[in-house]
Every structure is written in structure tokens, then in C-alpha cells.
Image (cartoon, grey):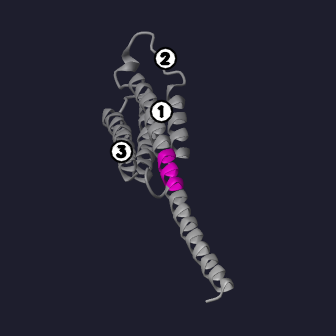
Amino acid sequence: MALSDWITVIGVAVTLLSMAVSIHQAQRAQKSSQSARSAMAAIQLSAVGERLKSAQEHIRDVAPDKPRARGYKVGNRFDLIRREFDNALSALPKAGPGSVARGHLTKAQIELNEYQASFSSIPDTTKWGALQVLVQDTISELASNTADIGEVK
């Protein structure tokens, strides 16, 4: 073999090696990107769960026994709950992690509306209880989704 043939063979070998390194780096970059997306999703779901804990406090503020308390005024408490629900729903996806929690929260909105309608006359304790359970189920589902996303990494 002539010198030019050897140079060609070495050039091809270096090119193939460079290609293999490039493919390996691209795969690592893709894994890092997926890991970052998973971390962001976990943080977002966790944040929604924390905000819903605030909604739980507001729900306790409109307990069925509250209207009987002297000097109690409902004020904008139902609006505060509704705002927390709206913020959470806007952050939760319709499909994928968090979608089951979104379904629970949508049902909780219905219970909230029905409970608010009964609040001024005779507060419906079953609606209030169902509302609390649905919000707690939503928080639990979000915590579970966050843990599952963390394990996938």
C-alpha cells in the first residue's frame, strides 16, 4: 500500500471514531434533557400540591358550623378557594402526570359550587366533606406523581 492509501485509511478511522463520539454525546444530551423535563414537571406538581394546602385552610374557614358562630362573615372565602382551584387547574395537564389530580380537582369545583349554594341557608355537610376529601385526594395524587417522576430519573 502506498502512503496515500494509509493516510486515507487513517482518515476514515478517525472520521468513524469522531462519529461514534458524536453519537454518544448526543445520547447523553438527550438523557439530560429528559431528566431536566422530568425535574421541572415534578417541581410544578409539587408546587400545585402546596398551593392546594392553602385551599384546604380556606375550606376549613367555610365549615358548616361557621355560619352559627357569632360575628362570622363569609366574605370572599369562596372566591379564595375558587382562585386556588383555578391556579391549580391552569398548571395541571389534561394528559400525563397530574391528569388524575386534575380530574379530582374538577369534581371538587362542582362540590364547592353546590356547597356554596347551600351555605346561606343550611350548609350541606356532605358536600363540604366531599370537597375536603377531593382536595386531599388531589394533594395525595400530586405527591404520588412527584415521587413517581423522581424515581424515573
Circle nearer the viewer, 1 or 3: 3
Type of amino acid at the residue the image marks with label 2? Lys
Image quarter hosting the N terminus: bottom right
* Secondary structure category for the residue under label 3: helix
In this view, the residue in front, 78 or 97, is: 97
Circle nearer the viewer, 2 or 3: 3
Tell me residue 29's x, y (percent). 55, 57
Task: Give the distance between the C-alpha atoms of the residues marked 2 and 1, in whole angstroms.
Answer: 24 Å
Report if residue 78 lies within the magenta region: no
- The magenta stretch is 32-41
* Secondary structure category for the residue under label 1: helix
In this view, the residue in front, 28 or 119, is: 28
Q: Earlier in the sequence, mark 2 or mark 3?
A: 2
Task: Give the distance between the C-alpha atoms of the residues marked 2 and 3, in whole angstroms.
Answer: 40 Å
Q: Which residue is mark 2?
A: 73
Q: Which residue is mark 1?
A: 51
Type of amino acid at the residue the image marks with label 1? Arg
Q: How dense is the environment of label 3, judged by Cα within 10 Å: few (below 14), some, or many (20 and up)?
A: few
Report if residue 34 lies within the magenta region: yes
Q: Which residue is mark 3?
A: 147
Above or below, 86 against 20 in this view is above
- Choose top left, top right, bottom left or bottom right for residue 54: top left
* Secondary structure category for the residue under label 2: loop
Q: How dense is the environment of label 1, judged by Cα within 10 Å: few (below 14), some, or many (20 and up)?
A: some
**Badge count:** 3
**Left or right, 50 with reference to 33:** left
